[in-house]
Amino acid sequence: MYAAYAAILVSVYHHSNYLERSISNEGDYERHALMERLTLMDNEDCYNQLRMGKDAFARLVTILRGTGRLRNNAHSNVEEQVAKFLHIVGHNLRNRTMKFYFKRSSETISRHFHQVLRAIISLDDVFLKQPDGLKCPQEIKDNTKFWPYFKDCIGAIDGSHFRVKVSNDVVQRYRGRKYYPTQNVLAACSFDLKFTYVLPGWEGSASDSRILDNALVRDFDKLIVPQGKYYLADAGFQLKTGFLTPYRSTRYHLKEYSVHQPENAREVFNLRHSSLRNAIERAFGVLKKRFPIIASGTEPHYPVDTQSDIILACCILHNYLMGVDPDERLIAEVDKELFSEEAEFESMVLSLAEKCKEGEILREKIAMDMWKDYNRNR
């Protein structure tokens, strides 16, 4: 009896081992097929899922492997590790979703994600380069609206808010202009839409000007303004050496001039300043559209420190792709949305102007009626 029971146990044990090996082999096959489809077959699939073409992906894998931080192992190669990371940041996916697609455990997905994250951040000195200021940007030199007036300008700088997940005891510090907590990320870019400096992590309640002052002290070796050069900044910053802001109490935003053209020297300056500084808004727009993990309207899955690292990594990837695979369709989409926002604003301004005119007519009528009655009763 005991011998028969033992035989059954041995049979069950061998069968379970066989099933485990079969599932493992099946998972390997499915992963191999998925990676082939993503990175070797259809370029459009690679764009849609990994946010870059096949060649750009292959180059990125080579670069990251070269850092020494990512290696093939017995269970996964660098290509798979990088693909998982790009899939997550490109679609804001959770580990349980990636577990389903890649047939890996949640622990493996998380470990690979953070390994790739650290490897990408290690490339910041390679892809986040300060402008040397020796040459005037071609975007300025080729445009008579900007040349020679902004010949010493090296880029644009601004802050942008990204949603974060923080504990209740600090949430008020992170709640600024939005009803939900955010971090204010200071960034500078060149006019080819590449970031030259990125400082994530500041609370959403912190002003752009305060963050810049801190950055000039803490990152004096990274945020460098060559002698005689300057960045364009909006009215949220202080006018000072190295940072040129628009005139205050004067129309500034592009959409404001879609209704009425400039009427004096200050308005001409503000219009062209805004047109050139718009590069930083476009750069942030492309960044957020390419990597939804940092632009989602929902609360992030990661704590604020990790989310800050993700933003920095996405900026590095953005710069890499602007050099080898800029995706003109994506840039055109962002430009269209910015233009649409301006058109919507113009419509609102026209509607407001009509209401103001109606109000002026009504006010004038009441005032004249009062004046007539006042004179009659004196």
Image (cartoon, grey):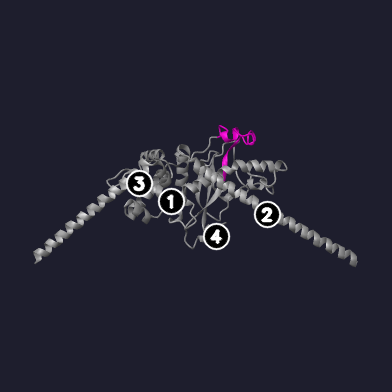
Of tags 1 and 4, the one toward the viewer is 1
In primary-sequence order, the first of circles 2 and 1 is: 1
* Residue 181 on the magenta segment: no
Of tags 3 and 1, the one toward the viewer is 1
For badge 4, the amino acid type reads Tyr
- Which residue position is annotated with label 4? 179
Element type where label 3 sits in the image = helix
Describe residue 171's horizontal placement relative to residue 375 as left or right: left
How far apart, in angstroms, are the residues tagged by discs 3 and 1?
A: 16 Å
Label pair 2/3, CB-CB below 8 angstroms: no
Of tags 4 and 2, the one toward the viewer is 2
How far apart, in angstroms, are the residues tagged by discs 4 and 3?
A: 36 Å
- Quadrant in which residue 67 is drawn: top left
Question: What's the residue at 28%, 48% (across, down)?
Answer: 28
For badge 2, the amino acid type reads Ser
Of tags 2 and 1, the one toward the viewer is 2
- Which residue position is annotated with label 1? 91
In primary-sequence order, the first of circles 1 and 4 is: 1
For badge 1, the amino acid type reads His
How far apart, in angstroms, are the residues tagged by discs 1 and 4?
A: 24 Å
Say if residue 171 shows up in the picture. yes
Residue 127 image offset from top left, x and y in percent:
46, 39
In primary-sequence order, the first of circles 2 and 3 is: 3
Of tags 2 and 3, the one toward the viewer is 2
How far apart, in angstroms, are the residues tagged by discs 2 and 3?
A: 53 Å
Q: Which residues are magenta?
A: 133-157
Rendered image: mark on residue 366:
none
- Which residue position is annotated with label 3? 81
How far apart, in angstroms, are the residues tagged by discs 4 and 2?
A: 28 Å
- Which residue position is annotated with label 2? 351
